[in-house]
Image (spheres, rainbow, N blue to C red):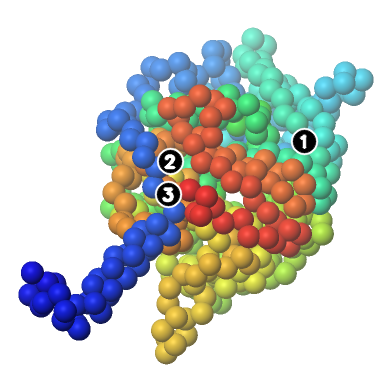
């Protein structure tokens, strides 16, 4: 019997067969073009918070001993460091003593300030911030907090010592290695992510944190003791290398039902950033230079429409970037603009519409996001041609556009996002629902090696990787879907 009941000699059978074959071929091509959805299947299990008596949460011994120590860059160029810590019993001293490793340098003292805040039925400890300036590039420093100069005899004096290394001078061919983590929380999976990061053989020097820190807002009345426990948990890393902070939705802590009407109150009290150095009017969006990279932090949860402070700042900021000085341009924003998971789908769309054309025009190399609790890397694509009447409303490959990486896979209590859109969109190069971290190893002005590391693998194993070619200095096609 012929096709659709026609005889073998029917003149209509050949075109119909041909059209059916063409349709199947095109359908297969659409799926194939969507890049790679990893075949790795992580065991289904709920992320569980570590108990409060875990060693990772243990406060240091001694009366009023400094805890929750963390550092971040303290200026625009990388010659200052903000040192922050908390004392729980009394204010104590806000001074930091610091000196260079070589031993010939005399010790110096910088004076900081402390603050406190109340949130519902919680009162914070004394949160100290001290910005030490005029540091030398590429130098290891030791620093001490809790020096207790003004304490009574026998009280305080619980000095704690840490160290950090300043970056090399800003320059176009300066190699530097960044780590990337988002949506960390304080579960057993969070601990695995941080341990994996600490043991990565590429030895990242600075962490780009893509938002959602403690997840305190997941607990009754936004239990702010979870902010304290989280800061003790990550101290083992962030006291020794700077973490560059991006605000996420779990930093909002906006809870009018319990009388808390000021967004970002715990976050902005605890985590200071050098926003004024880049002309920003808010700590929620700012920029820094570090080695050969220019890093711009944006806030998904602050006003970003035309005429708003964030809009005006970014409009003025992008033209300031000198790619002969800092070739690598990286943007951090919590809510992803491209996301093929069925979680938080298109939540970043209005911000993308506002700003994507600017990022394409500026030839941004990489956009980092979190929010979706999984991993995804895009091709270089843009969706900037639409003007309501022309119908051009889909993403297309564009070698002037950034690669978009979603890395909200730190391990938080809400668990993995494992429901993906199918078929995989053309723009999605690789995706996988697993916990992990990423590394960007900048080699020079033209090349950087990127890798993503899942927690279940060995420390050196790269579950996803690619070579980035700089959009200004080496703008060749670095697509990877055809290689998958």
**Distance from the alpha carbon under mark 2 to that under mark 3:** 18 Å
Q: Secondary structure at mark 1?
A: loop
**Distance from the alpha carbon under mark 2 to that under mark 1:** 28 Å
Per the image, the residue denoted by label 3 is 36
- Depth check: 173 or 482 in front? 482
The mark that comes first in sequence, 2 or 3, is: 3
Q: Secondary structure at mark 3?
A: strand
> Mark 3–mark 1 contact, CB under 8 Å?
no
Q: Name which residue lies at 43% across and 73% down.
A: 394
Q: Is residue 106 left or right of residue 381?
A: right
Marks 2 and 3: which is nearer the front?
3
Q: Is residue 159 left or right of residue 110?
A: left
Label 1: few (<14), some or many (≥20) within 10 Å?
A: many
Residue 409: numbered disc: 2
Residue 356, above or below 245: below
Can residue 270 be seen? no
The mark that comes first in sequence, 2 or 1, is: 1
- Depth check: 328 or 283 in front? 328
Residue 63, position as x, y percentages in the image: 55, 15
Q: Secondary structure at mark 2?
A: loop
Residue 335, above or below 146: below
Residue 46, position as x, y percentages in the image: 28, 32
Can residue 89 be seen? yes
Indicate the quadrant where residue 191 lies.
top left
Residue 421, position as x, y percentages in the image: 31, 56
> Mark 2–mark 1 contact, CB under 8 Å?
no
The mark that comes first in sequence, 3 or 1, is: 3
Per the image, the residue denoted by label 1 is 166
Q: Is residue 468 left or right of residue 184?
A: right
Marks 2 and 1: which is nearer the front?
2
**Distance from the alpha carbon under mark 3 to that under mark 1:** 38 Å
Q: Name which residue lies at 72% across and 29% down.
A: 164
């Amino acid at each position: 019997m012929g096709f659709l009941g026609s005889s073998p000699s029917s003149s209509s059978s050949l075109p119909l067969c041909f059209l059916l074959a063409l349709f199947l071929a095109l359908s297969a091509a659409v799926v194939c073009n969507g890049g790679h959805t990893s075949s790795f299947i992580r065991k289904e299990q709920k992320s569980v918070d570590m108990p409060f008596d875990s060693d990772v949460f243990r406060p240091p011994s001694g009366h009023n001993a400094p805890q929750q120590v963390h550092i971040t860059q303290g200026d625009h160029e990388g010659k200052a460091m903000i040192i922050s810590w908390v004392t729980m019993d009394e204010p104590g001293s806000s001074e930091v003593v610091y000196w260079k490793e070589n031993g010939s340098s005399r010790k110096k003292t910088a004076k900081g300030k402390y603050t406190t805040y109340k949130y519902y039925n919680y009162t914070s400890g004394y949160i100290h911030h001290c910005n030490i300036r005029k540091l030398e590039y590429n130098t290891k420093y030791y620093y001490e907090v809790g020096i207790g100069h003004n304490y009574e005899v026998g009280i305080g004096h619980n000095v704690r010592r840490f160290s950090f290394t300043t970056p090399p001078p800003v320059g176009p061919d300066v190699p530097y290695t960044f780590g990337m983590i988002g949506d960390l929380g304080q579960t057993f999976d969070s601990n695995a992510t941080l341990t994996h990061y600490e043991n990565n053989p590429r030895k990242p020097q600075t962490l780009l944190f893509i938002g959602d820190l403690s997840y305190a807002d997941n607990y009754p009345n936004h239990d702010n003791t979870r902010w304290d426990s989280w800061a003790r948990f990550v101290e083992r890393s962030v006291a020794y290398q700077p973490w560059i902070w991006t605000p996420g939705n779990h930093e909002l802590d906006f809870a009018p039902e319990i009388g808390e009407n000021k967004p970002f109150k715990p976050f902005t009290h605890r985590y200071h950033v050098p926003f004024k150095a880049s002309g920003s009017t808010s700590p929620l969006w700012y920029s820094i230079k570090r080695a050969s990279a220019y890093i711009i932090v944006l806030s998904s949860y602050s006003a970003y429409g035309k005429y708003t402070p964030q809009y005006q700042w970014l409009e003025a900021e992008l033209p300031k970037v000198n790619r002969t000085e800092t070739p690598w341009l990286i943007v951090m924003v919590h809510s992803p603009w491209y996301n093929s998971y069925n979680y938080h789908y298109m939540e970043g769309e209005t911000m993308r519409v506002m700003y994507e054309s600017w990022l394409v025009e500026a030839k941004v190399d990489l956009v980092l996001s979190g929010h979706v609790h999984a991993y995804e890397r895009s091709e270089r694509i843009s969706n900037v041609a639409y003007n309501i009447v022309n119908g051009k409303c889909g993403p297309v490959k564009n070698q002037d556009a950034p690669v978009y990486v979603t890395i909200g896979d730190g391990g938080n209590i809400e668990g993995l996002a494992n429901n993906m859109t199918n078929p995989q969109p053309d723009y999605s190069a690789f995706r996988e629902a697993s916990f992990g971290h990423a590394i960007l190893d900048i080699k020079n002005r033209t090349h950087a090696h990127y890798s993503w590391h899942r927690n279940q693998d060995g420390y050196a194993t790269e579950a996803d990787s690619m070579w980035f070619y700089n959009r200004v200095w080496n703008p060749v096609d670095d697509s990877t879907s055809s290689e998958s």
